[in-house]
């Protein structure tokens, strides 16, 4: 079974309103021990995110002048943020969001692609924030109980009684016999895709090499 965001997300929506002050944002980060907060509008819909990096620009930006057209777009944006005093002025927009039904694997890919450490979770009907998904929530799947992991693995085995499965610190060793080589390879990939599996060591053997037959017939 593929885990979804709703299975692991934090139910507390760590957010501030657009008019929240610089100090209020820092206090929220400190209170909840997070590196970013979601900025929401009056209807609790995410409109952006303020991260520690955004706030650090206030201290790092030593050039206090109006934005110049000779600067790059990124430099102009950084100067604007450095001069900002409210969440609306400091935030990176638009907010990158997921829904409770988003798969954990897709959420992890989104975090990696966008280089963000947390994602606001929004209700699919209202667009309002209902929680927050942190990197540590995603990584928690790798410490799932062994019994729970074993149940998911047995669910993808064609005949569970014909296979032996050993799990040690997330590494799965599976052995057994299938008819075709393609079946052995497919089974390994199915197990590898289960949330919480760190690696798969396949000792599954096969009776017939259908991949060799396909290559020779080309």
Image: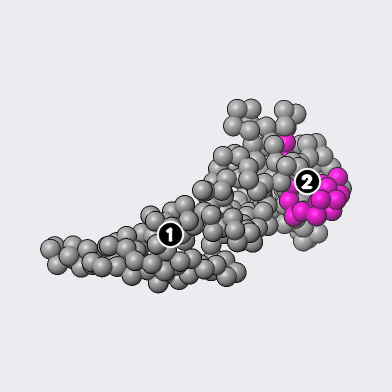
Instruction: Determine which quarter of the picture holds residue 177.
Output: bottom left
Q: Residues within 10 Å of mark 1 (few under 14, many from 20)?
A: few
Instruction: Determine which quarter of the picture holds residue 189.
Output: bottom left
Between residue 56 and residue 161, name the one nearer to us: 161
- Residue at numbered disc 1: 161
Q: Residue at x 38, y 55 (%)?
A: 158
Between residue 107 and residue 38, name the one nearer to us: 107
Horizontal relation, residue 62 to residue 212: left or right: right
- SS for tag 1? helix
Q: Residue at x 82, y 39 (%)?
A: 20
| Viewer can see residue 58 | no
The reply to whether callout 2 and callout 1 are in contact (CB within 8 Å) is no
Percent position of residue 12, x then y:
76, 42
Magenta stretch in the rendered image: 24-41
Q: Residue at x 55, y 67 (%)?
A: 167
- Distance from label 2 to label 1 (Cα)? 63 Å
Numbered mark located on residue 84 in the image = 2
- SS for tag 2? loop
């Amino acid at each position: 079974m593929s885990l979804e965001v709703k299975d692991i997300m934090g139910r507390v929506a760590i957010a501030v309103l657009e008019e929240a002050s610089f100090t209020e944002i820092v206090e929220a980060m400190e209170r909840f021990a997070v590196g970013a907060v979601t900025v929401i509008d009056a209807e609790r819909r995410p409109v952006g995110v303020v991260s520690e990096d955004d706030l650090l620009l206030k201290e790092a930006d030593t050039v206090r002048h109006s934005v110049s057209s000779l600067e790059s777009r990124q430099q102009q944006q950084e100067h604007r943020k450095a001069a900002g005093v409210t969440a609306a002025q400091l935030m990176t927009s638009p907010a990158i969001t997921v829904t409770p039904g988003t798969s954990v694997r897709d959420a992890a890919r989104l975090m990696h692609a966008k280089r963000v450490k947390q994602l606001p979770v929004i209700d699919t009907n209202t667009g309002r924030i209902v929680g927050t998904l942190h990197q540590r929530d995603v990584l928690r799947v790798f410490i799932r109980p062994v019994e729970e992991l074993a149940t998911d693995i047995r669910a993808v085995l064609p005949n569970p009684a014909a296979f032996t499965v050993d799990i040690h610190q997330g590494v799965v060793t599976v052995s057994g016999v299938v008819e075709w080589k393609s079946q052995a390879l497919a089974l390994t990939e199915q197990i590898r895709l289960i949330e919480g599996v760190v690696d798969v060591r396949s000792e599954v053997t096969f009776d017939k090499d259908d991949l060799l037959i396909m290559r020779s017939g080309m």
